[in-house]
């Protein structure tokens, strides 16, 4: 049953060094406040899982929290590169970053398998692509750790299996929770439900905690008994957006391109925006 | 650009030409960046019934400004339906319901294979690119694929460094052998003109060039021995209506 606690307490209890952590939110409702708290608590050796690493994982990678990244698209949407991610992959700074790479369809299905209690999911995908061999390297590289060809037992068609994702902890942001810890989110709901249901533990940050949730026909509801911790974090998905609360701060995404290009400037950003903020 | 003396840029004629390739009433799975601009322009001009689908799960979305990302709020607020990410890929894309997949590329080869993963060796890349996103399955499963990419020697290569999304693989028969259900890339639209696959060899050839662009210029900016298709045409420049609609979008995107 969800415990409603302050954010720092939720992250402290749910996220441990060496954990596999999935922070999801497809452009919308990205859990930035929670990600920043993970940096602030100086978690290390995390396996970071996320379809679209975005600024939030650029920040965690640059801050040295990650050992490995499992992902399907690592860019700054509409702007360009994630420079901290690139620096880690291309120059092993601040530490080498192991990567396990998929397509969106593959990642989505891996979460579905995890949420469904199955060892793998199946799709028509990856065939003929370098991703099939690459968890590692190009044409002669080792087999991908989480992609295999399988034969349909009914038709004989060759399909692709991807292994289930079952993160130690999933972290998502939602518009609302009620005082019992039931969570409601709407708009682009991405992969959050699957991530929470696939994970062993979960933290949900919310814009507000209300006495009761108004029913919304298009909303995803995560009942309190599927969530470990709920924490109020108003504005907690900025600079992404929370439909009905605030818009995406496109300027911040543009500005990140400059901040993140330079190791020193990124270090200053960490000091003032993450560590400074904690001591106020 | 200086080789286009008229009052439109190479990017503008590219976007307009790409928009024209999208027919009214069809369904289009839209990648971010150049494809998104062209698809929205098509809907604002000759194809008001074009159904735009983004991998964020927004189906039939009708934004009045260009989204900066594939998951902008405007896409959800103006959509016929918003579905989850597993659903958009499994129920909508995978069975072959979508007419056109519209993709960008960092590198593309003569068989229309696309690389958006790495430049250089995968394990020790010169440049780490964003990766696959939705593209591999869009390229595999849409009935047809259109690629929009600026034509340079760096982008148009004999062999891509990494196959992120399959075009015609190693040539005729590849898609069938791989069990890819869609027909593959039908057009590559660039800032010089349009390339289409030769029906026999699957190799991309120049089928149209913009006014003032020569075949030699296109060949100079292509890393394979680019042939001219029989009946190579000069493509029409943008109309005033198209340019005005495009510039309205671009201005609003910057607001």
Image (cartoon, rainbow, N blue to C red):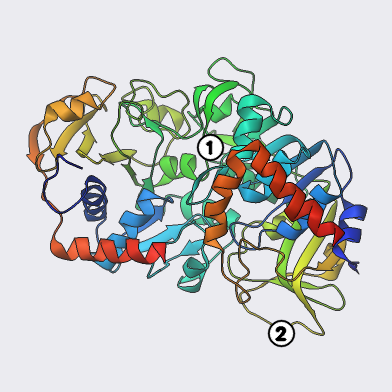
Q: Could you tell me residue B238's position as x and y percent? A: 15, 55
Q: Is the residue B65 above or below the residue A41 in the image? A: below
Residue in front for this viewpoint, B123 or A192? B123
Q: Is residue A141 left or right of residue B163?
A: right
Give the residue at mark 1: B131
Crowdedness near tag 1: few (<14), some (14–19) or many (≥20) residues, C-alpha within 10 Å:
many
Residue in front for this viewpoint, A209 or A109? A209
Residue at position x 80%, y 48% from top? A39
Q: Chain of mark 1?
A: B
Q: In terms of image quadrants, where is residue B122?
A: top right
Q: Is residue B119 left or right of residue B211?
A: right
Q: Chain of mark 2?
A: A
Crowdedness near tag 2: few (<14), some (14–19) or many (≥20) residues, C-alpha within 10 Å:
few
Residue at position x 63%, y 49% from top? A55
Give the residue at mark 2: A214
Q: Could you tell me residue B133's position as x and y percent? A: 53, 44
Q: Note whether residue A153 is visible.
A: no
Q: Is residue B67 left or right of residue A265?
A: left
């Amino acid at each position: 049953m969800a415990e409603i606690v302050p954010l720092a307490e939720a992250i402290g209890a749910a996220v441990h060094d060496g954990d596999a952590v999935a922070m999801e939110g497809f452009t919308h409702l990205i859990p930035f406040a929670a990600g920043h708290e993970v940096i602030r608590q100086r978690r290390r050796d995390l396996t970071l899982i996320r379809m679209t690493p975005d600024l939030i994982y650029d920040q965690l990678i640059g801050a040295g929290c990650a050992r490995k990244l499992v992902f399907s698209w690592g860019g700054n949407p509409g702007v360009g590169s994630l420079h901290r991610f690139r620096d880690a992959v291309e120059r092993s700074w601040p530490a080498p970053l192991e990567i396990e790479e998929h397509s969106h369809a593959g990642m989505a299905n891996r979460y579905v398998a995890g949420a469904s209690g199955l060892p793998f999911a199946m799709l028509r995908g990856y065939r003929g692509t370098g991703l099939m061999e690459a968890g590692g390297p190009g044409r002669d590289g080792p087999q991908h750790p989480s992609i295999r060809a399988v034969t349909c037992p009914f038709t004989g068609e060759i399909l692709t299996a991807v292994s289930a994702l079952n993160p130690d902890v999933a972290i998502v942001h939602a518009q609302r929770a009620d005082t019992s810890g039931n969570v409601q989110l709407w708009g682009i709901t991405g992969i959050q439900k699957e991530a929470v249901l696939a994970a062993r533990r979960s933290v949900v940050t919310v814009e507000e905690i209300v006495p009761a949730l108004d029913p919304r026909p298009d909303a995803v509801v995560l009942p309190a008994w599927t969530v470990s911790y709920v924490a109020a974090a108003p504005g907690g998905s900025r600079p992404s957006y929370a439909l009905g609360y605030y818009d995406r701060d496109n300027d911040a995404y543009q500005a990140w391109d400059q901040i993140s290009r330079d190791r020193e400037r990124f270090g200053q950003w960490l000091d003032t925006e993450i560590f400074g903020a904690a001591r106020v | 650009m200086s080789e286009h003396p008229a009052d439109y840029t190479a990017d503008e004629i590219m976007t307009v030409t790409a928009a024209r390739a999208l027919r009214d009433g069809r369904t289009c799975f839209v990648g971010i960046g150049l494809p998104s601009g062209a698809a929205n322009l098509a809907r604002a001009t000759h194809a008001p019934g074009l159904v735009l689908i983004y991998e964020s799960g927004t189906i039939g979305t009708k934004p009045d400004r260009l989204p900066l990302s594939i998951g902008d709020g405007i896409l959800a607020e103006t959509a016929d339906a918003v579905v989850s990410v597993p659903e958009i890929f499994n129920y909508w894309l995978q069975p072959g319901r979508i007419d056109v997949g519209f993709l960008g590329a960092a590198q593309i080869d003569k068989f229309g294979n696309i690389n958006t993963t790495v430049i250089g060796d995968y394990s020790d890349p010169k440049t780490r690119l964003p990766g696959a996103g939705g593209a591999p399955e869009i390229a595999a499963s849409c009935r047809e694929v259109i690629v929009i990419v600026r034509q340079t020697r760096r982008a148009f290569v004999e062999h891509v460094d990494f196959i992120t999304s399959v075009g015609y693989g190693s040539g005729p028969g590849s898609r069938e052998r791989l069990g890819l259900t869609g027909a593959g890339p039908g057009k590559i639209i660039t800032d010089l003109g349009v390339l289409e696959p030769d029906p026999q060899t699957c190799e991309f050839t120049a089928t149209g060039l913009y006014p003032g662009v020569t075949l030699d210029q296109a060949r100079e900016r292509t890393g394979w021995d680019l042939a001219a298709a029989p009946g190579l045409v000069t493509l029409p420049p943008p109309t005033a209506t198209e340019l005005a609609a495009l510039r309205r979008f671009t201005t609003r995107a910057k607001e």
